[in-house]
Amino acid sequence: MIDLKEIAENLIRGKAPKVKELTQKAVDEGEDIQRILNEGLLAGMSVVGDKFKRNEFYVPEVLIAARAMKAGMEIIRPLLTQKGVKGMGKVILGTVRGDLHDIGKNLVGMMLEGAGFEIIDLGIDVSPEKFVQTAREKDADIIGLSALLTTTMPGMKDVVEAAKASNLRAKVMIGGAPVTQDYADEIGADGYAPDAASAVDKAKELIGATE
Ligand code: B1M
């Protein structure tokens, strides 16, 4: 069995092909997907975040680490998404205006897809108008918003207000490292989830599909 720390270490060093190879190897060896994600890929990204905070890493290093993370996620994506039962509901997902972070959002999207939700991913730097327009066109059940910067969090409030003003039936769920339940309450969002696994539970709760 490969040591999952090796995946984390290569991710920190930004070695995308190696991360891809090791992730594939772990999958082939029958390692638990959740452990590969948590102890390999996310563990590595968390070290990158700490180094960034301490100014030991700068944006270029973080970007190449993010690319390595994506290479690993490509391998586990089909495995995370295949176990789902289809037909849970439709989610419009995106990172709010001014914010370019998408790793967490993509993970949330994969987990929701795996739980049977249909995901319409609008990507990064998405305006409130785009969220609302797409939710109306697609008759979405949920609008899922991600923000990683304290400066872009107010964009979530703009979406909540735009959705309310348009009388959309979609519920708004929010998340991202600086986001909290208190903030969700403050801006009138319908739900908050601290991580991708809880996002699945919260989405089910919002559409009334909890067992
Ligand atoms: Co950025 N960055 N970054 N960055 N970056 C942070 C967020 C930061 C905390 C780093 C730090 O200082 N320690 C800091 C924000 C400080 C703040 O506002 N409080 C920061 C900064 C300052 C910046 C720039 C301003 C840096 C600069 O240019 N000087 C700049 C801003 C660019 C912009 O967006 N306009 C910037 C740029 C970048 C990169 C482009 C280099 C890169 C992003 C690459 C990419 O995403 N494609 C990047 C990265 C990678 C990070 C860190 C290191 C890692 C983020 C990440 O991917 N985490 C980050 C430090 C950190 O968070 N430790 C940092 C892994 C991911 C799986 O977790 O996204 O939290 P996360 O998602 C989780 C949960 O939050 C939750 O579930 C996910 C899975 O469990 N979740 C949801 C997320 N969305 C959800 C939605 C939901 C529910 C749950 O419902 C819909």
Image: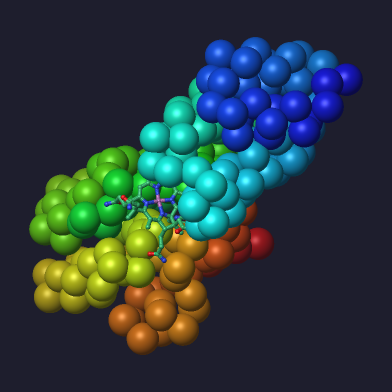
Residue 151 appears left or right of 201: left
Considering depth in this image, is 81 or 145 the residue closer to the camera? 145
Residue at x-position 54% and y-position 56%: 54
Say above or below: 193 vs 36.
below
The colour scheme applied to this rendered structure is: rainbow
Q: Residue furthest front?
A: 56
Q: Quadrant of the N terminus?
A: top right
The reply, left or right, for residue 111 in relation to residue 95 is right
Do we see residue 75 in this rendering?
Answer: no
Q: Position of residue 77 (x, y in %)?
A: 55, 28
List x then y, in percent, for residue 116: 51, 41
Please state if 25 lies on the left or on the right of 170 as rendered. Answer: right
Between residues 109 and 58, which one lies in front from this camera angle? Answer: 58
Instruction: Look at 83% across and 27% down and name the residue there.
Output: 3
Picture coordinates of residue 111, whole percent (x, y): 55, 43
Q: Who's the residue at 50% across and 44% down the image?
A: 57
Total residue callouts: 0
Left or right side of 208 for 161: left
117 shown above or below 2: below
Tell me the residue at 62%/16% (across/down): 18
Looking at the rendering, which quadrant does residue 207 occupy? bottom left
Residue 169 image position (x, y, % from top left): 26, 66
Quadrant in the rendering for residue 121: top left
139 up-or-down from 158: above or below: above
One can see residue 57 in this view: yes
The quadrant of the rendering that contains the C terminus is bottom right
